[in-house]
Amino acid sequence: MRAVAIDGSWESWRDAARGLLAEGALPGDVVFCDPTASGDLFSGPPLPVPAPTGVLKVPRRFLDEARYVAHHRSATRWGLLYRVLHRLTHGEAELLANGLDPDVHRLRALSKEVHRDAHKMHAFVRFRRVGGDDDAEAHYIAWHRPDHLIVPLVTPFFVGRFASMRWAILTPDRSVSWDGVTARFTDGVPRSAAPSGDELEELWRTYYASIFNPARLKVGHMRGEMPKKHWATLPEAALIPTLVHEASGRAAEMVKKSTSNGSAAAFVPEGASLEVLREASKRCRACPLHESATQTVFGEGLGGARVVLVGEQPGDEEDKQGHPFVGPAGKMLDKALAAAGIARSEVYVTNAVKHFKWRPMGKRRLHQKPDGGEIEACKPWLFAELRLVKPDLIVALGASAAQSLLGKTVTVARDRGQRLASPSGDVIVSYHPAAILRAPDDDARDAMFELLVEDLRLVRKVLAA
Ligand code: URA
């Protein structure tokens, strides 16, 4: 067995491996000796590193994975890397494509563990200010306990982030300090060597509380992402129980705020044409419905129509296609319009709410009635459409449209078929085509359909006048 001395760095292994390959050394004949290994893997003093020779062609993918594996704590990593490298360069060029191969499997597993550890170090290192009151004198120290030997691997990240600060990151295995120009690596230090408690902690706590989004809270995920062993060095960890406790209340408040105080007014361009409004509506974020909808479904039809039909909100099909009343309710509406002698091309069709509100039910998206806040938030779009189309008559199909146009006091059962005054013009309230589709039986469905047609005949008269 041949013992080869390396200094524990990726670069030293890489150079040694190139020399060994050039010499034809077989993986089974070599053991790498580094200061992080236990020391009893070989007997006798390690030999000097063979000098690298020639150009070695290895897949980029191996180098990417190997660089991470080199920072793993496993004592067998160097041997694994050399074995894989040897196989890659001795007739198994496609080896890495075989995830079932034990060496490839292990390579990937180690690489993944180091990736994860590096990600956590990027996220959980917290610097504390030490030294001089003068900012020019100040420097910053962090203590962290990574699972693997990743200090050299993550150093470029911290140098990039905090290039103008003077800082040190201490870990039990290795430390690094940055003076604004050079990164220096030194031995590891115990936890007690890092100062604790300072002005930055309070600042960080306040910042964390302000960026903490209760609506996104997933406690299990948070615990997984912020393992307990890091809590001691994270000032915000002290806040977590309180924040978790308050989260549901704060989330409800956020939803309330975003639905009842939100208004599309800020998104509606002044003096715009219908086309410009339609474009602008695509960017509306006035209420949370845009988050789960595929797209905004704006009104469509004759620009100067004498009649505007207002529905509730786009349904599943409308959401996918981006046009109002094209799904089952649209077909029912077309049937009623035809029965009343009205062509769809004669009217303008829109909705009180421009995004589809739904909840998942298995693989289906189940329609959800918009609430008062969402109807209110969307009003500026509807009113802008009505100001431009200037209809003689507006038909409110169902309760949500009636609420948007006339307020909450109107009910379909009591007020349907009557001509009511609204700030946007005269309104007739009638049944929503979807309510007809949901009727409990054929008789009820036929009766509701007849009433809708009756109301639309009034519309016919307006169009004919
Ligand atoms: N229901 C509505 O209220 N509007 C549509 O566009 C489709 C279904």
Image: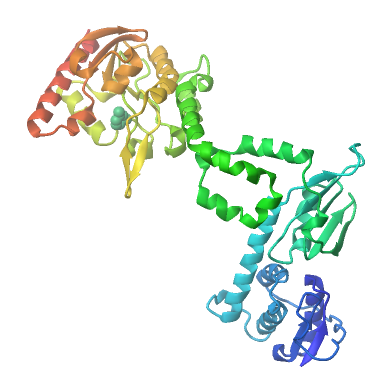
Q: Position of residue 216 (x, y in %)?
A: 52, 42
Q: Position of residue 73 (x, y in %)?
A: 70, 71
Identify which residue is drawn at 91% across, 40% down: 132
Q: Quadrant of residue 438?
A: top left
**Residue 263 in sight in this render:** no
Most extreme residue toward the left is 443
Identify which residue is drawn at 38% across, 18% down: 303
Identify which residue is drawn at 77% across, 63% down: 172
**Quadrant of the image containing the C terminus:** top left
Q: Position of residue 389 (x, y in %)?
A: 38, 14
Question: In terms of depth relative to the viewer, which is nearer, 342 or 315?
Answer: 315
Q: Quadrant of residue 5?
A: bottom right
For residue 461, above or below residue 22: above
In screen coordinates, is 339 left or right of 1? left
Q: Which image quadrant shows ligand 1? A: top left
**Quadrant of the image containing the N terminus:** bottom right
